[in-house]
Image: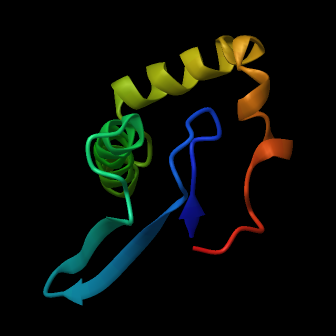
Amino acid sequence: HTFKFTNFDDPPCVVRYRLKEVDGGTEFTLINENVPAGTKTAKYMTQGGDFITANLKSIVETGKPTAGGRFALFMMGLFSVFTPTACRSENWPFDREI
């Protein structure tokens, strides 16, 4: 899927999830493509990838996100009223092509 932080001027990038059957389980790979190097998008995509991967692993293994993931999601909900207008869903570029 395409992805863009609407509060940055960086172009949209592509996020891919690859699942591969392996002995005893499934291998998960998160791939970010077309992320402009050295940008805030690149920094946040790296952090976000680590967050997604750690929490997906925890959900698969324990049935719930990590404690840090639960706390982060709680705080995001708590502070959502402070989200900048540029980040609202009506500004998401779902119709853009890369």
Q: Is residue 68 above or below residue 94?
A: above
For the residue pair 91 and 22, the one nearer the viewer reads as 91
Which residue sits furthest left? 23
Give percent across and percent down for residue 46: 29, 44
Which residue sits at x=47%, y=23%? 72
Give percent across and percent down for residue 29: 27, 70
Q: Is residue 49 above or below residue 82?
A: below
Which residue sits at x=37%, y=57%? 35
Q: What colouring style does the render use?
A: rainbow
Marker count (numbered): 0
Is residue 75 shown left or right of residue 77?
left
Which residue sits at x=34%, y=49%? 49
Is residue 3 shown left or right of residue 64?
right
Which residue sits furthest right? 90
Give percent across and percent down for residue 93: 73, 56
Q: Quadrant of residue 83?
A: top right
Is residue 22 shown left or right of residue 32?
left
Q: Quadrant of the C terminus?
A: bottom right
For the residue pair 60 and 82, the one nearer the viewer reads as 82
Q: Quadrant of residue 87?
A: top right
Q: Is residue 2 above or below residue 54?
A: below
Give percent across and percent down for residue 11: 53, 55
For the residue pair 34 and 82, the one nearer the viewer reads as 34
Which residue sits at x=65%, y=40%? 6
Q: Quadrant of residue 32?
A: bottom left
Q: Quadrant of the N terminus?
A: bottom right
Q: Is residue 4 above or below residue 86?
A: below
